[in-house]
Amino acid sequence: AQSVTQLDSQVPVFEEAPVELRCNYSSSVSVYLFWYVQYPNQGLQLLLKYLSGSTLVKGINGFEAEFNKSQTSFHLRKPSVHISDTAEYFCAVMKGNTPLVFGKGTRLSVIA
Amino acid sequence: NAGVTQTPKFQVLKTGQSMTLQCAQDMNHNSMYWYRQDPGMGLRLIYYSASEGTTDKGEVPNGYNVSRLNKREFSLRLESAAPSQTSVYFCASSRGETINEQYFGPGTRLTVT
């Protein structure tokens, strides 16, 4: 079975500082990787996804993630965060056409 | 397009009561999903429907039933609610092809007392 580990449950960061949210997955076969964002009292929306090809994936709102097969990681980065980036971020993995498996989430708090 | 809609937004039940959470999508998607979200647990799949007429159990199906009423609608039923089912419930849909993103509804916050 697939599993996803988000290494940090909470990440506080000052406004305009860079941030990295870490995600590791367990699988010995090809998988597809996603990052979703959940703003307070809302549903989830897709930030970016890795299906194949270039290992550096760019998403919405200036976020990007790098797929590293040897380390089974898919860390999310942003070079300069804004207050509006305060939200919970979920890493998710899919194998074939099976449903997504989500990590437990990382709460990003941006401090003014 | 409204996307994925869920009703109700909030609900309070007493232990043992039953209720149905409704979900509808207007994107002509084939696959639909029900998740629950609990603090520190992420999202856990309850049931899903890969296509109209099929349903499958997810990670945490006990205490729930589902109905794929038609291509648009996928309901989740709690027959006898328990306090452990206090959670936020999300419905999602996807095209159902090999790899595609899921679109989420706004959620239903359920409290069982």
Image (tube, coloured by chain):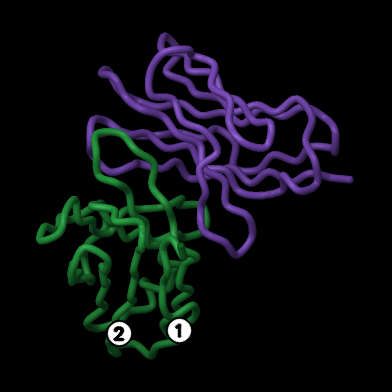
Chain colours: A purple, B green
Looking at this rendering, what residue extends furthest in the left direction?
A: B53
Q: Is residue B94 left or right of residue B110?
A: left
Residues tagged by mark 1 and mark 2 found on one chain of the structure: yes
**Residue sitting at 47 percent across and 12 percent down?**
A54
Tell me where residue B108 appears, x and y as whole percent.
45, 72
**Residue at x-position 67% and y-position 37%:** A61
Q: What is the chain letter for disc 2?
A: B
Identify the residue at image location x=31%, y=54%. Answer: B45
Q: Farthest residue in the top direction?
A: A70
Any mark on residue A1, and which?
none
Depth order, front residue of A61/A86: A61
Dot label at residue B11? 1
- Which residue is disc 2 drawn over? B19
Relative to B20, A67 lies left or right? right
Side (left or right) of B11 relative to B77: right
Residue B80 percent location from the top left of the image: 24, 83
| As drawn, B60 above or below A98 | below
Query: Which quadrant of the view contains residue A3?
Result: top left
Compared with B34, B66 (above or below) is: below
Which quadrant holds the N terminus of chain A?
A: top left
Amino acid marked by disc 1:
Gln
Q: Amino acid at mark 2?
A: Met
Q: Are marks 1 and 2 in contact (CB under 8 Å)?
A: yes
Residue B106, given in percent of the width and then of the height, sits at 50, 65
Chain letter of the residue beneath label 1 in the structure image: B
Q: Position of residue A14 (x, y in %)?
A: 84, 37
Q: CA distance from mark 1 to mark 2?
A: 9 Å
Could you say whether the residue bearing mark 2 is in a helix, strand or loop? strand
Residue B83 position by quadrant: bottom left
Residue in the foreground of this view, choosing between A36 and B36? A36
- Which residue is drawn at the image coordinates 58% and 31% (left, top)? A59
Q: Check disc 2: other Cα within 10 Å, few if <14, some if 14-19, many if 20+.
A: some
